[in-house]
Amino acid sequence: MSGAVRRRALLQAGAAGAAAAGLAGCERLSQSPTVREGLESAEPLTKASQRALQGRSALAREYRPEDVIQPMRANGSTNPAAPEYRRLLESGFQDWRLQVHGLVRNSLSLSLDQLRAAPSRTQITRHDCVEGWSCIAKWTGVQLSRVLAEAGLLPNARYVVFHCADALDQQPNGERYYESIDLVDAFHPQTILAYEMNDAPLPVANGAPLRVRVERQLGYKMAKYLMRIEAVESFAHIGRGNGGYWEDRGYEWYAGI
Ligand SMILES: Nc1nc2c(c(=O)[nH]1)N[C@H]1C(S)=C(S)[C@@H](COP(=O)(O)O)O[C@H]1N2
Ligand SMILES: [Mo]
């Protein structure tokens, strides 16, 4: 079974579950014929055919303020137990710094204020989870391309890895969530490090203080509770080597929609 087909089956299972449970908010959106058609028609596309048809630099659809469908459902980790994270949260993220390191000319350590002072991008986009639900929310943040330009990627950098504060099992030694994208997505104009959702500071449930938006891919690529961004040539040595927490558990690395 191809990866695309497997994901399609997952989506359908998720939608059926939502229908049985009775629908509200984001789940209702996933049932709407236009969204279902959108998801289903895009899904059989492989990475290569999506590239050929649209180009990887094509923009994801952006919506109007009245299209926002809330509450934004929170998924995966929603309140990390890691002591390091609890301390940062208690201090209102005053001591939090985003580290940018690896194959870069200048390692960076950026405060939330520094990120907020940079030129921002705001976009209203649809979040599609592999489990079969979607939400539409407004996101504001700094383009990842700006941060990477400041760090200066070295020529051998091929991916950026997002290291997160949370372990899904909430255990002190639990494997931390992580994700990775290639440089096409890293420099895509809609790939932002978001610190606001719907005009308010990013809630803890949705990844405070900073989370990734990669609008051309499924929700699991959009790392929450961001701590470090590492530029690498290969992700073989990170986690179990497949480029992400869920990829290490069988999901596809490229989750284009
Ligand atoms: N650090 C971290 N990032 C994460 C997750 C997570 O558990 N931990 N879950 C992923 C999944 S599967 C989805 S659908 C989205 C959920 O984002 P939301 O909570 O804002 O809806 O975050 C993604 N990023
Ligand atoms: Mo998800």
Image (spheres, rainbow, N blue to C red):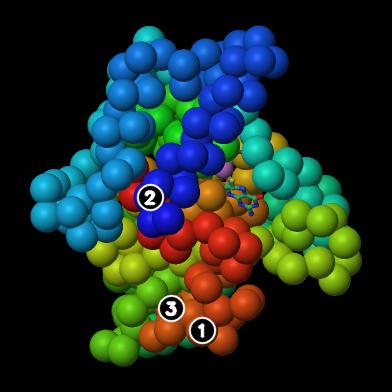
N-terminal of the pair, mark 1 or mark 3, is 3
In the depicted structure, whether residue 155 falls above or below residue 253: below
N-terminal of the pair, mark 1 or mark 2, is 2
Which label is found at residue 4?
2
Please name whichever residue, 4 or 55, is drawn nearer the observer in this view of the structure: 4
> Ligand 1 within 8 A of label 1's CB?
no
Look at label 1 and name its amino acid.
Answer: Ala
Q: CA distance from mark 2 to mark 3?
A: 28 Å
Under tag 3, what secondary structure? strand
Under tag 1, what secondary structure? loop
> Ligand 2 within 8 A of label 2's CB?
no
Is any atom of residue 187 visible in this view?
Answer: no
Locate ligand 2 by image quadrant.
top right
Q: Identify the residue shown where x is 31% and y is 24%.
A: 37
Query: Which residue carries the number 3 mark?
Result: 231
Please name whichever residue, 254 or 186, is drawn nearer the observer in this view of the structure: 254
Q: CA distance from mark 1 to mark 2?
A: 23 Å
Would you say 235 lies left or right of 57 here?
right
Please name whichever residue, 120 or 113, is drawn nearer the observer in this view of the structure: 120
